[in-house]
Amino acid sequence: MSSIEKIQEFKVALAEEKINLKTLRELCFNGIPFEGGIRALCWKILLNYLPVDQTQWESFLKKQREVYSQFLKEMIIQPGIAKANLGLSREDVTMEDHPLNPNPDSRWNTYFKDNEILLQIDKDVRRLYPDMAFFQRPTEYPCQLILDPQNDYETLRRRVEQTTLKSQTVNCNRSGVTNVSSPGKALNLYPSNEYEVLPNGSEAHWEVVERILFIYAKLNPGIAYVQGMNEIVGPIYYTFATDPNSEWKEHAEADTFFCFTNLMSENRDNFIKSLDDSQCGITYKMESVYSMLKDKDMELYLKLEEQNIKPQYFTFRWLTLLLSQEFLLPDVIRIWDTLFSDQDRFHFLILVCCAMLILIRDNLLAGDFTVNMRLLQDYPISDVHTILTKAKELQDTS
């Protein structure tokens, strides 16, 4: 089928007032066209963000985007205003409001805890897809609410700079001896200097991703932020922020937040350490890859067992990050088209992992422990079409 015919098929499916999810899933399974913003729109439906009834879209999107603006006001702007105003009128600072208040429920205790999470997010989002310039570039649609000069508050960017400056000025070594370095010198160590600081009124795409992850952490204190979530949100945001349709692109931040939240509701158990050994945890999923391999290719399974190559040595990253670290971003996006369209999408991910092993079986059967670990840590096949075809073949024969 030509790409024009394929695009036409999608247009027909998406023109229905009430979208037939089964038909759409079947189309998306074989890859979604980028043209006309079809992929971004399909992902919003497949990730259970947009309702299948198109007549509800306008009011639904308006409401969701207002909700997200409210999150920004409550979790970034208001705490930032409170911090900016601290010390302006000392007489009305109560013990409850005081930054040195030892009460674990105090507003400032929360503020300082949030800073720890923010620093970790900041470190991770700055190095998101370093081989691509996209995340360092300014967004065409900076968040006006955040950049409004009328809002005199401490931005996330400022919070990171201040916290980094303070934590680097006073350093404790492992013996407990404190070294105080000059603030100027400490600032040079700050990773923001790796990238050109954008002028006022602009913000880079990575800053938008940082904000999404910070809001998610605030709303989900049970999981907060775990390293790797940046790799999950990155491809979703990239897909929405490069949508050729500007009405959608303008709201990439809010739409990414809700789609990421929905995806994490299905994938979050992989990030919760206490659930690792439960049936919904990551250990069970890693073992499922080997159970399937045992069923499909006993010889290869026995070889890996004999060499004591445990599934957690490589499948932890494959499964937790949905293969986002194993391939280039366009290929990750293509894999995700299929994963999102499969109703039991995380079962299909196990099939994909199994296919990846079987496709390099000859190398693995010939290699020793060191060679094989290197192969699995740096997967040699870059053609994702071959991998997805093999995974589908495994699914059809099970």
Image (cartoon, rainbow, N blue to C red):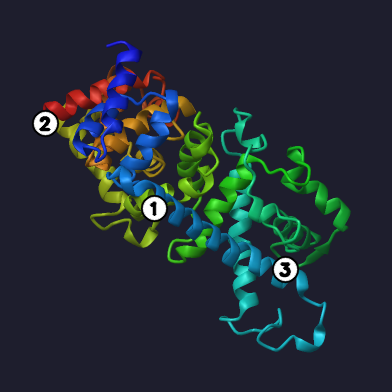
Q: Callout 3: helix, strand or loop? A: loop
Instruction: Tell me: 85 left or right of 248.
Output: right
Q: Residue at x 43, y 50 (%)?
A: 61
Quarter of the image with the N terminus in it? top left
Q: Earlier in the sequence, mark 2 or mark 1?
A: 1
Amino acid on which disc 1 is placed: Phe
Residue 14 vs 81, above or below: the answer is above
Residue identifier under label 2: 398
Q: Which residue is at a point 58% across and 67% down the rendered structure image?
A: 74
- The residue nearer to you, when weighing 343 against 282, is 343
Q: Disc 1 and disc 3: Cα gap in Å?
A: 54 Å
Q: What is the quadrant of residue 367 in the picture?
A: top left
| Nearer to us: label 2 or label 1 | 1
> How many other residues sit within 10 Å of disc 1, few (<14), some (14-19) or many (≥20)?
some
Q: Quadrant of residue 348?
A: top left
Return the residue at label 1.
60
Q: Position of residue 63 (x, y in %)?
A: 44, 57
From the viewer's perspective, tell me whether residue 93 is left or right of residue 296.
right
Whether residue 373 can be seen here: no
- The residue carrying pointer 2 sits among few (fewer than 14), some (14 to 19) or many (20 or more) residues within 10 Å by Cα, namely few
User: Which residue is identified by label 3?
Assistant: 176
Secondary structure, mark 1, is helix
